[in-house]
Amino acid sequence: MVRAINTNATKKNMPNKDTLLKGFDRFHDENYGEGGLMQTLTRDGQNPDFLIISCMDSRAAPETLFNLKPGSCFTHRPMGALIQPYVPDSRSSREIDAKLTFSIQQGVRDIIVLGHTHCGAAIGLASNADDPHIKPWLEVGKSALKRAQAKTPGGDTEALARETEKQIVVTGLHNLMEYPAVEDNLGKISMSGWLFDMEQGQILELDVDTGEFNVQKRDEADQIKKTGTFTS
Ligand SMILES: [Zn+2]
């Protein structure tokens, strides 16, 4: 039996839905009308440049962070930006492989795993959170946690969480490389690992040779092309 959702229970914390509709009015003003972007995208279809895999966190939406217009990127936003290892015939792997395939078919050539600091999933992993609804999903991040523990021996929970946020990106890229859609398109696509440092307001990029995350300068962003070479 499906439990009825008590809409009144959460009402006091909910903004009026007019907030959304006012936002849509602004979106409409900017994107519809003569020569509007949405009319073009509707008529010609989408041709995004990026697939960004990031956390569901409300503070780290790629379209907002990168000030993207409609039609610019596909997104996949699992909690923690955790990417499961490829398991043939599993539904979750099929979902990711389908998204990768469709994105590449639509012209995506840059796939970015975008982690972020102060991530609830990383904090949950580092503090061994035991919510029965969330913990089973966080199991996906156990290998990232192990890597982080090895890098922060004796560190406190916060230090472990910060390192886990980075290792989620590293292991996510590792896991993505196992997906058939990526294997079949090596040489055509670029894979990158980024981290949104929420406190500092910076985008860091994973150097796959050193495993370090470095501040990404704006004018260097266009030069990043590690086409199909992520191996370690
Ligand atoms: Zn997060």
Image (cartoon, helix red, strand yellow):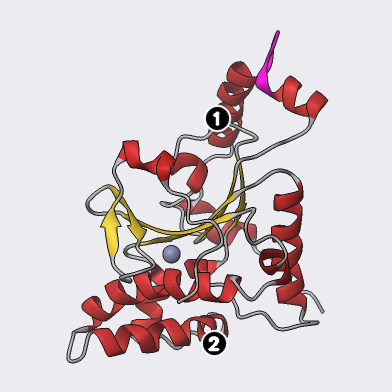
Horizontal relation, residue 223 to residue 27: left or right = left
Q: Which residue: 49% across, 47% down?
A: 62
Name the residue type under label 1. Gly
Residue 152, quarter of picture: bottom left
Amino acid residing under circle 2? Pro
Contact? badges 1 and 2 (CB < 8 Å): no
Q: Is residue 164 above or below residue 204?
A: below
Instruction: Give the percent coordinates (x, y) of residue 228.
Output: 56, 62
Where 126 sits versus 97, above or below? below
User: Would residue 20 be counted in the magenta stretch?
Assistant: no
Position in image of residue 43 (x %, y %): 82, 24
The one of 20 and 190 positioned closer to us in this rendering: 190
Which quarter of the picture shows residue 165? bottom left
Does 15 sit left or right of 152 as displayed? right
**x then y, percent, for residue 112:** 51, 56
Crowd class of label 2 (few under 14; some 14 to 19; many from 20; radius 10 Å):
few
Query: CA separation, marks 1 and 2?
Result: 35 Å
Mark identifier at residue 221: none
**Residue range (magenta):** 32-37
Q: Name the residue that disc number 1 marks.
A: 23
Residue 15 showing in the rendered view: no
Q: Is residue 212 left or right of residue 114?
A: left
Please name the residue shown 61% across and 29% down the image: 24
Rendered-image quadrant of the C terminus? bottom left
Q: Secondary structure at mark 2?
A: loop
Label 1 or label 2, whichever comes before in sequence order: 1
Would residue 197 be seen by someone viewing this image from the given angle?
yes
Residue at 51% x, 41% y: name it. Answer: 63
Q: Is residue 219 left or right of residue 187?
A: left
Query: Dividing the image into 4 quarters, which one contains the N terminus?
Result: bottom right
The residue identified by callout 2 is 132
**Of residues 189 and 214, which is closer to you in this image?**
189
